Image (cartoon, helix red, strand yellow):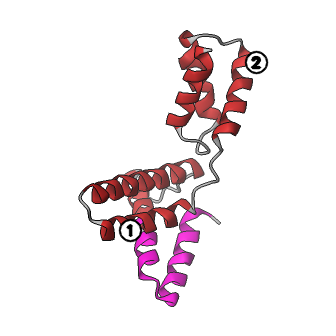
Amino acid sequence: MNLEQQINNDIKAAMLARESQKLNALRAVKSAILLAKTQKGGNAELDEESEIKILKQLVKQRQESAETYRAQNREDLAAEEQYQLDIIQTYLPQMLTPEEVEATLKTIIADNGFSGMKDMGKVMGMATKTFAGKADNKMVSDIVKQLLAQ
């Protein structure tokens, strides 16, 4: 079952359970998916990578909104954003831990003989393909810098 079908089923379940907060979060995901499908023109089906990208974008928006609300001492609105963030994250694949990322990066660096910051771009290129949707690129970049600086 693809993400869109899963979201539709969860929307129905949230409606029957009268979970309005969850329903709002799910409707935001559905809206983003429909918007992405129409931008490509026609009845284009989204691949898993595109769906993950959409979900990550929604998560980032919720995080930024929650931070802004907390800075303005609006904890009620921040709590709403955090709730939606938690709901949306359940649809993302399980993220790798920093330890798992570091172990894989060490293997990539060792197997290809990379050393020093001059190889940062090459390592990141390979890492981006390896960790697509499974790790935050900022975390990967920080770990690569740390490993190449040694």
Q: Residues within 10 Å of mark 1 (few under 14, many from 20)?
A: some
128 inside magenta stretch: no
Q: Nearer the viewer, residue 126 or 69?
A: 69
Q: Which residues are magenta?
A: 2-28
Name the residue at 42% across, 56% down.
58
Above or below, comparing residue 49 to residue 98 in the picture: below
In the image: residue 105, left or right of residue 124: right
Tell me residue 100's x, y (percent): 70, 38
* Front-most of residues 62 and 121: 62
Q: Position of residue 142 (x, y in %)?
A: 53, 29
- Residue 81 vertical placement versus 67 (above, below): below
- Assign the magenta stretch its main secondary structure: helix
* Quarter assignment of residue 27: bottom left
Q: Secondary structure at mark 1?
A: helix
Amino acid bearing label 2? Asp
Question: Is residue 20 rendered magenta in the image?
Answer: yes
Residue annotated with mark 1: 79
C-alpha span from label 2 to label 1: 45 Å
The local crowd at label 2, few if under 14, some if 14 to 19, many if 20 or more residues have their Cα within 10 Å, is few
Identify the mark at residue 111; answer none if there is no mark. Answer: 2
Give the left or right position of residue 70, taking residue 136 as reference: left
